[in-house]
Image (tube, rainbow, N blue to C red):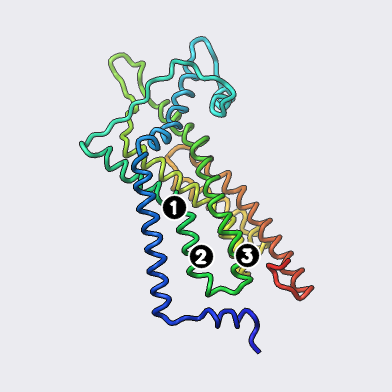
Amino acid sequence: MSSPDEVEIEASRAPLMEHLVELRQRLIVCAIALALGFVLCFAFARDIYIFLLQPFEVGASLMAVQKSVGAHHGPFDLLLTLVGLREAPHSIEHLKLVFTAPLEFFFTKVKLAAFGAVVVTFPVLAWQLYRFVAPGLYKRERYAFLPFLVASPVLFAMGAALVYYLMLPFVLWFSLNQQIVDAGNVSVELLPKVSDYLSLVTTLLLAFGLCFQLPVILSLLGLTGLLTSQMLRGARRYAIVGVFAVAAVLTPPDPISMISLALPICLLYEVSIWCVAIIELRRRKADAEGTDLVAI
């Protein structure tokens, strides 16, 4: 006799043409959402770009603190300025970025609008994807998938916030420290291009946001039984080495960026071990009671 889940799957079965029609409709909805998001973000591209320059301004503030006359500031003072507990001197250098091609800033705003459109419309895109694949999932699989659908954007936002508020200011402060401005007739100043700065910001946002998906990925693998908490604990040393290797590749060539990415990922790896252990505990409890895992 068929189980209720199998009956539900059979009831939702549809011919191939209906699936293709549904796929087309959902792709159209995604395309319209992306187009509207692009228009909206392009209309405010100038304001969004100025918002993305805030870490650069904070990095310059850290430089101003460091160069304060008659003061001896250490890393703790810089950290206080970064988190807003210490007011930066008013002699912050004027931020200046350049573009070297006539339409470079225009295409930079186009790229920014495209990136912003994906971020703004992600809930719509994720919901359309879920609604397309949901009929082919058992009810318990749909219930198990929904929490990860919520956790994924939250973790991505946490990674992006870490980049914006902590890592980027220190990276730019480190870059500003490489300038040569007190060697007589020799002057080496940082004048980043608008396109290079946007590439740096978007690359780091994506790198941190995607790396912060580690608990989601490992928990899903644990839910399917492909990984166990014991396996994750046994591979901890290799995972730490791998995390630092990935951080060295994805971040700019400075130790601050690498450590800023590697340490949170190592912490998330430990969180993933506990998440998988909880899933295993619930599975054992469900097996003992003869109930469904997601019903616990």
Q: Quadrant of residue 202?
A: top left
Q: Which residue is identified by label 3?
A: 222
Q: Which residue carries the number 2 mark?
A: 130
Between 42 and 260, the one lying in front of the other is: 42
Dot placed on the residue nearer the N-terminal end, 3 or 2 = 2
| Amino acid found under the numbered disc labelled 3 | Gly
Measured in 3D between alpha carbons, the distance from the residue under mark 3 to the one under mark 1, in whole angstroms, is 29 Å
Farthest residue, direction right: 289
Where residue 171 appears, as percent x and y from the top left, is 45, 34
Q: Secondary structure at mark 2?
A: helix
Residue nearer the viewer, 35 or 90: 35
**Image mark for residue 121:** 1
Q: Label 3 crowding class (10 Å Cα cut-off): few <14, some 14-19, many 20+?
A: many
16 vs 193, nearest the viewer: 16
* Residue 279 coordinates in the image, percent (x, y): 69, 63
Residue 252 % position (x, y):
42, 40
